[in-house]
Amino acid sequence: MQEDIENRTVALSISMTKFTAIGLARVLASACREIQRVARQAQTQCPHGRQSVKSLMKHGVATNTLPLDGETRLFDKVARKWEVDYSFRKIGHKKYLLLFKSGQADAITACFSEYTKLCMKRAKNKRPRIHEQLRKSGEQVRERSKELELVRETAHDER
């Protein structure tokens, strides 16, 4: 009888050891899944594209800066195509400082080359504004009227 009880006790302790090892493995696996889920969630919460300077600095990576003169909207359009993370800081009238992640320097270079091509194309095809056209035509009319007055004065002087 004593031997039977000892055998059952040994069998129970062995099965409990297996159970605790299996249970421990399950707990560790669920903890690992939870860590991976939190890491994925943190990656998806990180904003992309144009953002504030503060949120760009929260990414925890090194940033670089470049001066940008001109249209920020055109740069936004090109930067969305290249999927870069960037931010603008205004430093003067139509002058901005572009902040971007250092790891995206190649994408920023490609983005800037496309941006400069678009700027050059727009500058080449740029038509004068209507206010400028009106001002120039007004000046031409004034000059012409002065010339006509001079012609009339010389005609009156000859009589």
Image (cartoon, rainbow, N blue to C red):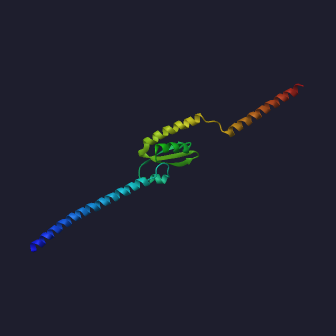
State the residue in front, 32 or 62. 32
Q: Residue 128, percent across and down?
A: 65, 36
Quadrant placement of the N terminus: bottom left
**Displayed quadrant of residue 41:** bottom left
Q: Residue furthest right?
A: 159
Q: Residue 33, percent across and down?
A: 33, 58
Q: Residue 68, percent across and down?
A: 53, 43
Tag count: 0
| Residue at the (46%, 39%) spot, across then down | 110
State the residue in front, 142 or 44. 44
Q: Residue 16, percent across and down?
A: 20, 67
- From the viewer's perspective, tell me whether residue 92 is left or right of residue 155: left
**Displayed quadrant of residue 138:** top right
Quadrant placement of the C terminus: top right
| Residue at the (68%, 38%) spot, across then down | 132
| Residue at the (66%, 39%) spot, across then down | 129
**Displayed quadrant of residue 105:** top left
| Residue at the (50%, 38%) spot, across then down | 114
Q: Residue furthest top?
A: 158
